[in-house]
Amino acid sequence: MMMKRIITKEDYIQSLKNLHHLVYYNGRRVEDVTEHPALRPHINSAALTYELALRAEYEDLMTATSHLTGKKINRFTHIHQSVYDLIKKVQMLRLIAHETGSCFQRCVGLDALNAVCMTAYDVDQKYKTDYFERFKKYLAYVQESNIMVVGGMTDPKGDRSLPPNEQADPDLFTRIVERRSDGIVVRGAKAHQTGAVNSHEILIMPTQAMGEESRDYAVACALPINSPGVILIFGRQTNEERKLEKGIDSGNPMFGLVGGEALVVLEDVFVPRERVFLCGEYDMAGILVERFATMHRQNYGGCKGGVSDILIGACAVAAEYQGTAGASHIKEKLAEMIHLSETIYAGSVACSAMGYETSSGAYYPDPLLANTTKHNVTRHIYEIARLAHDIAGGIVATMPFQGDLESSEVGRYVKKYLSGVKGIPVEARIKILRLIENMSGGTALAESMHGAGSPQTQKVMYGRLGNIEQKKRWAKRLVGIN
Amino acid sequence: MGVRYCGGCNPRYERVAMIQQAQSLMGDCVLFARHDEEALDGLIVVKGCPRGCGGRALIERKVPYHSIIAEGDLKSLSEWLFTLQHKK
């Protein structure tokens, strides 16, 4: 069924209510994701991608002009048409992170759309298929309806030493189980799917390069998240029960913690032919994966740079509240946090500035620089978090409950003994420290490590793109070795 | 008076608050509107930092314009608005 055009955040939230998709949280079916306290913060965050696009002060980054229709569209549905588009994407991610202090999830679908666009074109050139035309029709629908798409790449992968077709359970990689004249039937699962429970569609891609024997696993297709056979199981986060309290202790009550990930089970799901963009062309799976990974790794200096801006600001406020802002070691640590944050942002801008046009017409960031950026994120965000804990002090891990602060029996002690600089309300100090706690531990860190691919996947790319043979020639030439 | 903002990726001041302050200063004498409104007497280009992404593309209307890039630019903006109003 075609989705009604989504314009406002209210439209978006209503559209999710209408989905009636199959979501589970802690073993129980969630009838309405928008009313669930553990899911709602993530929905609020994604909803800002709609709201900010309507604000005059953000429209230059939040919107773009469709190359298909010439209409103004949300940038999260845009195919990059220039280097400037690539840079604007990174800038957009940073600005949204300033509003949410958390992941807003919609970049995954944007990257999937761009990766599939480029690759569908290339597959057509090689195999005389019609995937690119199918994709353009799908893209026109996405742009017109302004739906949120989750990019489904990561398969569970079972025994990592074995290819898909040799797994004990063949469903551990998503695969085609039936080819019909009107479409295909897919089975398997997609893991760690950011924003899946509040997306309208999933755009499935292969998880890795495939050999001929794994041709049934070389599949890219789009399907509504409420299709029969799609089951979503929401992932448990650190301190997630605090979201149920809707108070100070959750740290970021409005927007939660990272993206809200889910295991998406695909139990014999039918996908109509016009929504299939790769179907057995196994030799093209690798380039599709590489493109999606590159475009997703391009992002991380943008969103994590923006999130780090919030964390740095929170640490500076905490230092003021605690009377340490004037200490030279605190200034030094804040400066180091800024250095690390701007370094990752610089990487994202650089890989965008060095981007280029692909055969499809879509623009693509420099893959080596994009991978380097994400690799830096796996390190720098941990170091930023370490410095945040250092500045905040041990209190970040030992504060009493909000209930204690508000208690008629012990509240006065909390207010007395957690006070800092005179005149600063204790509640304000607790709020800012809880925000630091939320942003610098547990799930937030693991997401920086593994989101868009684990560090080893970036190192693999260095081996392929690092130009080592040329580097050897330069070294030998310099000292006269033939 | 049209208001045209840069994208706002990492602004160094509160851009919207600056325009609100300018509106307070000018009172009913000046009506602030979106940059794409049809009839404009002038355009305020609000850049969040000295780079001013968008450059000339932000100034797409054939009307007098004034750019602001920092918190301290409120004075020059209000002077420009008063001058424009006086000419009119």
Image (cartoon, rainbow, N blue to C red):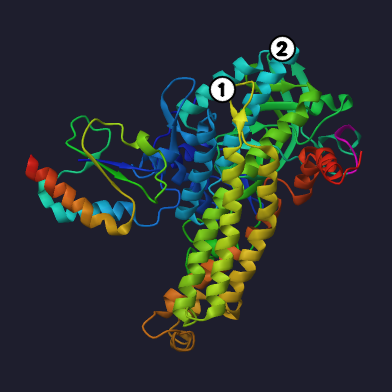
Name which of mark 2 and mark 1 comes first in the sequence. Answer: 1
The residue singled out by tag 2 in the image is A181
In percent of width and height, residue A275 lies at 63, 21
Residue A26 picture quarter:
bottom right
Q: Position of residue A163 (x, y in %)?
A: 88, 36
Q: Chain of mark 1?
A: A
Amino acid beneath label 1: Tyr
Depth check: A453 or A152 in front? Answer: A453
Marks 2, 1 in one chain: yes
When the figure is inspected, residue A72 is found, relative to residue A481, above or below; the finding is: above
Residue in the picture at 55% in, 18% down: A137
Q: Residue furthest front?
A: A480
Q: Judge whether A454 appears above or below B55 on screen.
A: below
Q: Position of residue A456 (x, y in %)?
A: 79, 49
Q: Camera-side residue: A412 or B58?
A: B58
Q: Is residue A399 visible?
A: no
The magenta stretch spans residue A397:
no
Which amino acid lies under the numbered mark 2 shown in the image of this protein?
Ser
SS label for mark 2 = loop
Identity of the residue drawn at 51% across and 46% down: A93
Q: Position of residue A348 (x, y in %)?
A: 59, 46
Magenta region: which residues?
Answer: A161-165
Residue A425: numbered disc: none
Please state if B58 lies on the left or on the right of A245 as rendered: left
Circle 1 residue: A138
Specify the principal SS of the magenta part: loop
